[in-house]
């Protein structure tokens, strides 16, 4: 039995949308007949309406006496040990659950995951791995924002994590690229030059070399490694472009009969485009390197995004994401 | 009389497309009756067919005995003093021309501009300023890739350059944002924290604070300052997303009658979208901080892009871009 826990109290739309998302997921478990059990962590008050729910056999309730506000500081989060997020991290550490999903404050979740659950041996800094739609299906970008400042030797670790994630998502022999400002070996700052050498040494054929920003969406490689500062800027820049394009399409569509009619006929395409570029489609991103599956759902998640995030976690457990990663890192010793 | 020079030998499609672009520009000068004169710098062999051209009164020819290949190293470029690019930089230094445009190797152009033409007093590192389409018309991103590594105190200088550029493009009171991984004051690495303090001190009301990647396309501010590494990644990431979207739209349009018809009726919109996101639309980016107007055209420029780059240069001269910047920096002493 796979046990996936959800922090019902985390997210801008918690607990209504988190609960609704949990029920959508429970419905899916029921249909799929998979051996999966959902654990909902939240305050008694917010969970009592689910006690006699028809889907109750698919989930259990774990009461937490406290919960964290969305603007909490990571250091404060570590002090509030009765919060739903902290309780989730403890359950994961104690192997009482196989995965933990939260749409709460990112820094708080990273802190609880790293310090309560702990790191996988061989990983110095856990990192956020984000799958990005690309011409080649998707590209895993890691680090998506957990570590603004890094050392070059973290990048082979990020690469190992990204590779295992890409495998879970169906890539058989993932290729890794180092995000840089040119493709030649000697490009970038000292950080990139040193990281290039370390990646080449560690991965050899799996390492493609340097890639540039456009290669993320073009899908030149399956995994793009970078520091959390650059990764976060790249991710958010893409979000902005997608919004701009959607705005231009909408505005232009209103301007003429051809535009209105074209947009109407094209609506399926535009919907698909929006879905492709919407971060909620993927629902959640793995916080990899922690000794337990942790999925960060977007703070703004609605029920669909929460359900998707729970599925991301399930996929990670089913695919043996952390076991594979540990095996790979064993070989590095 | 404003004198704009073009490096006819620079660019993947030189000299055919550079010459064709120059003639399109000459045609525009003729029509506009502006007091503008074009100077074409290239080898005798490549320019002899223009000697008796009907538009000859709008341009003159400057013979260079050498030209730089597209993959030249900056250090080698500085040694080849008879190249069209080096000659252009010399003409600019000697005030024989008001602006210089090249689609040649970026590093070589930056080296020739910085070391032959020289810097504006108060600017330690010239930087590439790139206007990016946004919900607010455009956002000037600086540095777009000239300086992979920077010091925090360069950022107020980048901001000053970006502000003057934004003014040239019609913004009356440009606001400046610092590219970061969150909007709070204490976000980012030591570099961003120090830069934040310096920007706040120098610009006060003009400084908006931290912005994130999505703010570039959303147009939250008029000028976004960052190091050349992050700036280059952001720019290229956007290019990639635009290509991905254009690909999705094309593929989907083929899949059904509705799609085909929709795309047909929507074609004007799609063309506008493509134009908006195509770097060639702007034609060229200013290399600011050099004591003379230098415009870098995309290496892959066709005649339209070259013509647009020449117009960018003209706009800079007409708007007094460098004079305004010098005046601003005078006040900093």
Image (cartoon, coloured by chain):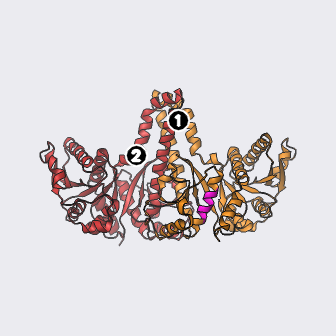
Chain colours: A orange, B red
Residue beneath disc 1: B252
The answer to whether the residues at label 2 and label 1 have Cβ atoms under 8 Å apart is: no
Residue A299: tell me if it is visible: no
Chain ID for label 1? B
- Per the image, label 2 sits on a secondary structure element best described as loop
Residue A32 percent location from the top left of the image: 77, 41
- Name which quarter of the figure residue A328 lies in: bottom right
Left or right of residue B81: residue B260: right
Magenta stretch: residue A290 in it?
no
Q: Earlier in the sequence, mark 2 or mark 1?
A: 1
Bin the neighbour count of mark 1 within 10 Å (Cα to Cα): few under 14, some 14-19, many 20 and up: some
Alpha carbons under labels 2 and 1: distance apart:
21 Å
Quadrant for the C terminus of chain B, please.
Answer: bottom left
Residue A234: tell me if it is visible: yes
Residue beneath disc 2: B278
Viewer-proximal residue among A81 and A37? A37
Residue A110 percent location from the top left of the image: 67, 63
Viewer-proximal residue among A8 and B145? B145
**Which residues are the magenta region?**
A157-164
Residue drawn 79% across the image and 55% down it: A41
- Per the image, label 1 sits on a secondary structure element best described as helix
- Name which quarter of the figure residue A186 lies in: bottom left
């Amino acid at each position: 039995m796979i046990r996936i826990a959800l922090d019902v109290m985390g997210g801008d739309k918690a607990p209504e949308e988190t609960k609704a998302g949990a029920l959508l997921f429970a419905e899916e478990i029921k249909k799929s007949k998979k051996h999966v059990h959902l654990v909902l962590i939240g305050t008694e008050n917010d969970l009592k309406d689910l006690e006699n729910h028809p889907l109750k056999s698919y989930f259990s309730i774990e009461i937490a006496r406290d919960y964290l506000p969305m603007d909490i500081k990571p250091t404060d989060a570590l002090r509030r040990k009765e919060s739903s997020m902290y309780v989730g991290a403890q359950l994961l550490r104690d192997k009482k659950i196989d995965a933990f999903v939260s749409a709460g404050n990112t820094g708080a979740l990273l802190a609880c995951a790293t310090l309560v659950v702990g790191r996988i041996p061989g990983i110095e800094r856990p990192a956020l791995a984000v799958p990005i739609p690309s011409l080649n299906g998707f590209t895993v970008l890691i680090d998506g924002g957990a570590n603004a400042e890094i050392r070059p030797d973290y990048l082979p670790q990020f690469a190992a994590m990204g590779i295992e994630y890409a495998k879970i998502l169906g890539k058989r022999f993932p290729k890794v690229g180092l995000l840089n400002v040119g493709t030649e070996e000697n490009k970038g700052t000292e950080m990139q030059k040193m990281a290039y050498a370390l990646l080449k040494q560690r991965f050899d054929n799996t390492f493609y070399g340097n890639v540039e920003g456009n290669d993320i969406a073009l899908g030149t490689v399956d995994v793009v490694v970078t520091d959390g500062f650059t990764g976060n800027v790249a991710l958010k820049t893409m979000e902005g472009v997608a919004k701009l394009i959607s705005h231009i399409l909408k505005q232009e569509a209103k301007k003429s009969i051809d535009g209105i009619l074209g947009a109407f006929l094209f609506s399926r395409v535009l919907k698909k485009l929006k879905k492709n570029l919407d971060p909620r489609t993927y629902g959640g991103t793995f916080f990899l390197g922690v000794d337990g599956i942790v999925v960060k759902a977007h703070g703004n998640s609605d029920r669909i995004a929460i359900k998707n995030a729970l599925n991301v976690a399930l996929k990670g457990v089913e695919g043996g994401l952390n076991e594979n990663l540990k095996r790979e890192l064993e070989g590095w010793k």
